[in-house]
Image: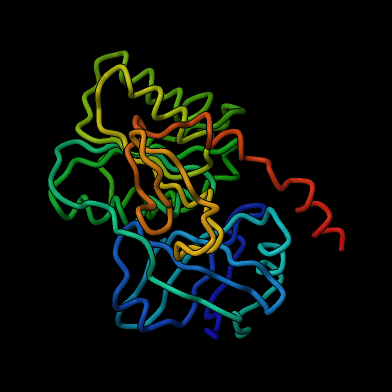
Amino acid sequence: MVKIMEKTEIAPNVHSCTVEAPDIARKALPGQFVIIIPDQYSERTPMTIADWDVKKGTVTFIFLEIGASTQKLAELKQGDDLYSFTGPLGKPMEIKKFGTVALIGGCYGIGGIYPIARALKQAGNKIICFSEARAKFLLYWNDKLEEVSDEVRYSTVDNSIGFKGHAYDDIEENLKAGKKFDRIIAIGCTFMMYRVSEASRPFGIKTIVSMNTVMIDGTGMCGACRLVVGGKTKFACVDGPHFEGHKIDWDIILSRRKAYLKEEIISQER
């Protein structure tokens, strides 16, 4: 068990949670994730590590309240214990000097790109972050992203701030206008990562996506996170979670997006 040190609803249904986990904080690297079980009756839920503090021994993650287990997680308060908190898991993001790097984050992925942007900036890269939401009030960590970026571009569907539309529309327009990126990294919902990959494909820019969205077990035991990358079967949890978006068979991934929607609804009702 780990104790919740701080928990805040930073946007409607979006929560930031900081827990006391010194062993994990000491070993965490950008792009890794943890497996969280709110109570003994909850499922295993993978969460990208959004921040950590070695001196304080804390780890922070961002989660979207969307299913029964994340709803239970949202109901916990500062001082409560999480039943299980395991990590860091997965291979870290490759960090070195690429040049100009675009990082796209949506929903929980805004928090997910933050430590990667910070590390890439420290490695000498020019960082341009694309942060998206349906409306301005759903965006968060704007100040944190601006601290580690050369530029932050905001996208909102309702045009309440920044570019009108989605981040994948914005980056596609930038690419078509001749904007040069040496690497693109996207973290967020499956469809957003797919669209970013398709937008960059004609330009041949290496595009990395984080496939936490298809994980369950997180340690290679269940096989639920199988995906086809470059014609070969991979497990998102142990082989990733980061893969080249242009090599993923997205048809297989997208067909599974709502496979358990009915069961999730029943679980929440119960």
Q: Residue at x 29, y 74 (%)?
A: 27
Side of 93 relative to 171 (left or right): left
Give the quadrant of residue 25: bottom left
**Direction front: furthest residue:** 232
Q: Residue at x 25, y 33 (%)?
A: 206
The residue nearer to you, when weighing 179 against 153, is 179
Task: Indicate the position of residue 76 as horizontal and vertical percent values.
Answer: 67, 75
Q: The C terminus appears in which quarter of the rendering?
A: bottom right
Q: Residue at x 36, y 39 (%)?
A: 232
**Direction top: furthest residue:** 177
The residue nearer to you, when weighing 41 against 55, is 41
Side of 246 relative to 219 (left or right): left
Q: Is residue 165 above or below residue 239?
A: above
The residue nearer to you, when weighing 249 against 39, is 249
Give the quadrant of residue 55: bottom left
The scheme the figure's colours follow is rainbow
Q: Is residue 161 above or below residue 73?
A: above
Q: Residue at x 36, y 71 (%)?
A: 52
Task: Indicate the position of residue 84 as horizontal and vertical percent values.
Answer: 56, 79
The residue nearer to you, when weighing 218 against 2, is 218
Side of 203 relative to 69 (left or right): left
Side of 98 relative to 231 (left or right): left
Task: Indicate the position of residue 147 as horizontal and vertical percent values.
Answer: 30, 53
Number of numbered markers: 0
Give the quadrant of residue 33: bottom left
Q: The N terminus appears in which quarter of the rendering?
A: bottom right
Task: Indicate the position of residue 193 as horizontal and vertical percent values.
Answer: 45, 36
